Amino acid sequence: MTNNSSNTYIIKNKSIASLIEVYKLIIRGVSEMKTFTVEQMKKLLNGEIIQGSADFQIKNVIFPWHVDDIRSPHTLVFYKNKRFEWSAIPKNLPLVVVTNKVFAEFRSFSELIVIKVDDVTKAYWKFVQYYRSLFDIPVVAVTGTCGKSTTKEMIKHILSAERKIQATRSSENSRLLHLSYLLGIDDSTDAAVFETAVGAPNDLKIAGRYYKPMIGIITNIGEEHLDHCKSIETYIQAKADMLNGLNNEGILILNADDEKIKTISLADYKGRVVYFSIKKDTDFYASNICYENNGMKFTLEFHKMKYPVFVPGYGEHQVYNALAAIAAVHELGIGIKEAGERLKSFVNLKRHIEIVQGISGSTIIDDTWSLNTTSLRAGLKVLNQMAQGKTRVLFLTDIETLGEMSWKIHKLAEEIIVSEGIDILVTVGDITGQMVEHFKTIGLEATVYSLKDCDEAYELLKKILHKDCILLIKGPMFNKSMAQMAVKLKQQ
């Protein structure tokens, strides 16, 4: 999705299934909010009540991009379309509409309250800024090509032991959900942590306008969403907008080992910068990293003190996630020892390096939540560490959302696969199919299969998997046929 203005969205290159998923998220996004009267809203927006009661209670607010978003009574609707759509009104009355155009048909609905304003978009943002200003709570924003969902969940897990936390759900980070998450903050909320993704330039600026975080985290920057960002440089700048989201004065937590993060200029940043690393002594430094049963063990070094930490989930990337999360909660007053203790009970998200037994006694690494070169390298490192002499199998689909950079990034994926090493490669997709011949010329010592679809891949994998095989499945989250294949391969 690209945006022409703050709240007008155009859908491009989206399947019907993907759109349905977005609608589901919007529907699920309705949250309990602090209530207001129509009179209070009229004064806030400098509006005029055209019809209806000034005492009416408002319990939800939406800025719909489609009329079907109106799904419950006592909702205030910021509506700026030139032509009003009436189909959703009768079944959801009573409603409040904020509009810049008054229609005669409004009088047909006795339970419809109408507030007229000069500019609907300006009125909407005035409400957003006002609602956020009601709550003096710490807010953490997390972005990155990989690890942002897990880092956000770790922060939420650590803080939730003693505080009420508002947070994004799973990896549901669409711009269309920002208002819903904001309205989920009420007088009982102690802190909030939000995953802030970049699908296009200005996404983080918009998220910052809603959430106004005091702590911002950039986990890493790889290659993703280049269909809208067009270039790596533009994508990096889109991530660097985290500084603007912090109003250039908050606490910025950065991965000191990430080469692209190092290119972000901090010359004008007036806030405090905190670094985490597994390669050099920084503010939060992990040493003695090793694989343990069901997770990673390491020593966290902070201000010349050393703390033993265990985090569930395999891979060095999981250590990075834990470091970022601990750094954030430490800024919110949680001791490092206490944060480490709470991390022991963290439960990883599904399809994020999820290791289970598969068919014929094989081992399956389900890493089908996202696919980019950063997550591919992380997954292959876990595959090689866990193999312990077993046959290493990689299932790979095309990498999506790369635009004109697609072939270049797929070439980088080739180099990663060759450098990390595998024994069997199974591909499905037009571009990965074209990569097969090239693998032979760049030194991949593996048996390679290029197949037309996931059904064909499943039949092949059924034949070649056995108890001495370990399979890494890599593909994008919305590829349903791949997800279904993974489920069947994980069945006993």
Image: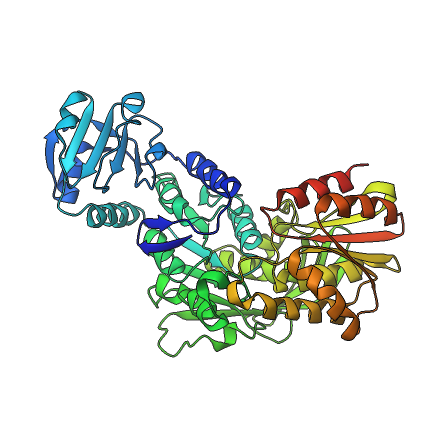
**Quadrant in which the C terminus is drawn:** top right
- Residue at screen point 56% across, 75% down: 259
| Residue at the farthest bottom position | 267
Counting from the top left corner in percent of width and height, residue 339 is at: 58, 54
Quarter of the figure with residue 297: bottom right
Would residue 52 be seen by someone viewing this image from the given angle? no
- Residue at screen point 74% across, 64% down: 436
Counting from the top left corner in percent of width and height, residue 331 is at: 46, 60
156 left or right, relative to 132: right
The relative height of residue 320 versus residue 470 in the rendered view (above or below) is: below
Looking at the rendered structure, the number of numbered marks drawn on it comes to: 0
259 left or right, relative to 249: right
Would residue 324 be seen by someone viewing this image from the given angle? yes
The relative height of residue 367 versus residue 30 in the rendered view (above or below) is: below
Front one among 447 and 492: 447
Counting from the top left corner in percent of width and height, residue 319 is at: 64, 61
Counting from the top left corner in percent of width and height, residue 255 is at: 55, 68
